[in-house]
Amino acid sequence: EARIGVLALQGGFAEHVAMLESAADARKDAKVVVEEVKYPEQLERLDGLVIPGGESTTLSVFLCQNGFGEKLRAFAREGERRRCVWGTCAGLILLSDHLDSQKQGGQVTLGGIDIQVTRNAYGKQINSFEAPLKIKAPALFRQAPPPGSTHQAHDECLGVFIRAPGIVRVNSDLVQTLATLDRGSGEKVVGVRQGHLMATSFHPELTSDCRWHSYFIDMVVTYKSSTSL
Ligand code: GLN
């Protein structure tokens, strides 16, 4: 059994719970239990965690209370039992090692992915947009896209961007590109993975395509089986 939590302090956690549940239902190989995480004590029993989108400054306020931030940092970074974390949008900001200082809102960051990030890089709320993305991770595009989806190619998916952070630089070879966006001004990295940590500046939980959630479940199951030997 793998137990995956969704941080439920603020932001779009309910959609992630629903997507993880449908991705888990579609799998036969591993039993996956999904729970909303509201208290730091819950982290101890988890094998993986999703940090949803929302507002990273507000999320930080919650994380400064009752040692949540420290417990979360330890969860993702310390010990032999490293557990997988996936941050979407505001969650990506938290997992990045370098945050553009001008737009910094005093966020508590956890770090772990060696990227430079700038907040609200694609403009304001009204500039939110959807665009096709190129998927770069073979394990992701080996899965079939959902029936009836507008993005039928296996190496494409829909990217939903809402006041999204931009990845302005990838600093390390350890960071693997999972997805890119090209709106005519060159390919931009919008999804990354560094070992047990994954981050996307877009919102797969707001689409009907649960391949990203299924990919994360794979990560969690693989890490769990390799560290419990
Ligand atoms: N703009 C938000 C922030 O800086 C992130 C937006 C989102 O998560 N949809 O925290």
Image (tube, helix red, strand yellow):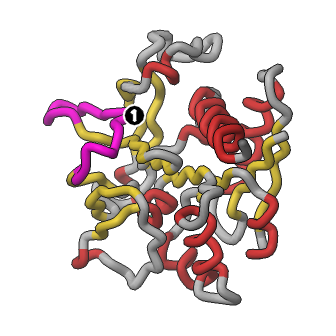
Secondary structure of the residue carrying tag 1 is: strand
Towards the viewer: 56 or 50: 50
**Number of marks present in the image shown:** 1
Is residue 181 on the magenta stretch? yes
66 relative to 159 in the view: left or right: right
Tell me if the residue at label 1 has its CB under 8 Å from ligand 1: no
Residue 219 pos. (x, y %): 60, 37
* 68 to 46, vertically: above or below: below
* Location of the N terminus (image quadrant): top right
Question: Label 1 neighbourhood size at 10 Å, few (<14), some (14-19), many (20+)?
Answer: many
Q: Is residue 207 left or right of residue 28?
A: left
What residue is drawn where x is 45% and y is 73%? 109
Is 215 within the magenta? no
Measured as percent of width and height from the top left, residue 158 is found at 47, 29
Residue at 57% across / 33% down in the picture?
Answer: 212
Q: Which residue is mark 1?
A: 178
Residue at 45%, 62% (x, y): give it.
95
The answer, for residue 213, to whether it is visible in the render is: no
**What is the span of residues highlighted in magenta in the rendered image?**
170-187
Q: Position of residue 103 (x, y in %)?
A: 28, 75
- Give the left or right position of residue 180, taking residue 7 as reference: left
Q: What amino acid is labelled 1 in the image?
A: Leu
